[in-house]
Amino acid sequence: MINTLLIGGKGTIGSGLRTYLPRLNPGYRITSADLPGAPDKAEPGTSTEFIELDASKDDDALRSALKGRDLVVYLARKDPLSDMNAMTDLVFKAVMDVCPEALMIGSSSVHSTDAAYWPFLDEPYATIATRQFEKVTVWPEPLSAMMEPCPVSDYGLEKAYVEAWCKRFENNGMDAVAARWGGINGENAMTDEIAYFTVWCHQEDSACLVDGCYRASRNITLRSGAHYYVVSDNTHNIFDIATPRQEIDYRPTHDAESFYG
């Protein structure tokens, strides 16, 4: 049994993990810890145990929920940035104290490295964003999974803060990975957001990344402190997913072009 706690598991990313992790391995036993009354975005009938708590305030309840966990995925967020970072401090410190042998997955985002490509004004990203692929003479090298954060917004800064905590876990001999989530939505469909076809990630593929990290952790092959881009195997990808393929056997099976339009 893989005793799993999703902190903020009723949201879009968490609902996908609750749906697809047990399909990848029926050994996942998932508990979702959420704010009282939080709406649940999971498919009807998704089997999950629920705990009501505010991870930004209920430190005792959080620590109680963490006991005996093998895997913790931190998905909760709040505004403003100062409150978000304070909650991140509480959560990571609690995991460090209560279940230091668990694998910690911290929620980052492709937006932690926004300065490398956003807002798709520089070439070749501007041409790619408008889907004028015939005009791209040389496709850019994928943005490396080794790239350090370079945020340009408060949202990116909160993700960079999570990544720093994952590095701290590494330095303390604990397993943690920052998941740089791509464009994940509950319908697994395309949206009109600029260049969504390159950041798109199917919920099943997000679960594959988490499962790959967990398997590598238990095999003692995980590169703790890593920050992996979590996007699908998109035809017009600009992000490095070769690194997690090699390091944790990440096997995304979906392509945005199958859903585009």
Image (spheres, rainbow, N blue to C red):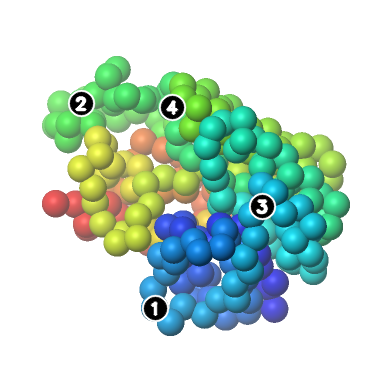
Instruction: Tell me which numbered mark, 3 or 2, is placed earlier along the sequence.
Output: 3
Callouts 4 and 2 close, C-beta under 8 Å: no
Depth check, mark 3 against mark 1: the one in front is 3
**What is the three-letter code of the residue carrying label 2?**
Thr
Mark carried by residue 114: 4
Evaluate whether residue 44 shows in this view: yes
Mark carried by residue 44: 1
Q: What element does badge 3 sit on?
A: loop
Give the image location of residue 59, x and y in percent. Answer: 76, 53
Depth check, mark 3 against mark 2: the one in front is 3
Instruction: Tell me which numbered mark, 2 or 1, is placed earlier along the sequence.
Output: 1
Depth check, mark 4 against mark 2: the one in front is 4
Q: What element does badge 4 sit on?
A: helix
Q: What element does badge 1 sit on?
A: loop
How many marks overall? 4
Q: Residue at x 52, y 51 (%)?
A: 245
Give the image location of residue 63, x and y in percent. Answer: 78, 59
Mark carried by residue 106: none
Give the image location of residue 226, x and y in percent. Answer: 64, 41
**What is the three-letter code of the residue carrying label 1?**
Pro
Instruction: Tell me which numbered mark, 3 or 4, is placed earlier along the sequence.
Output: 3
**What is the three-letter code of the residue carrying label 4?**
Asp
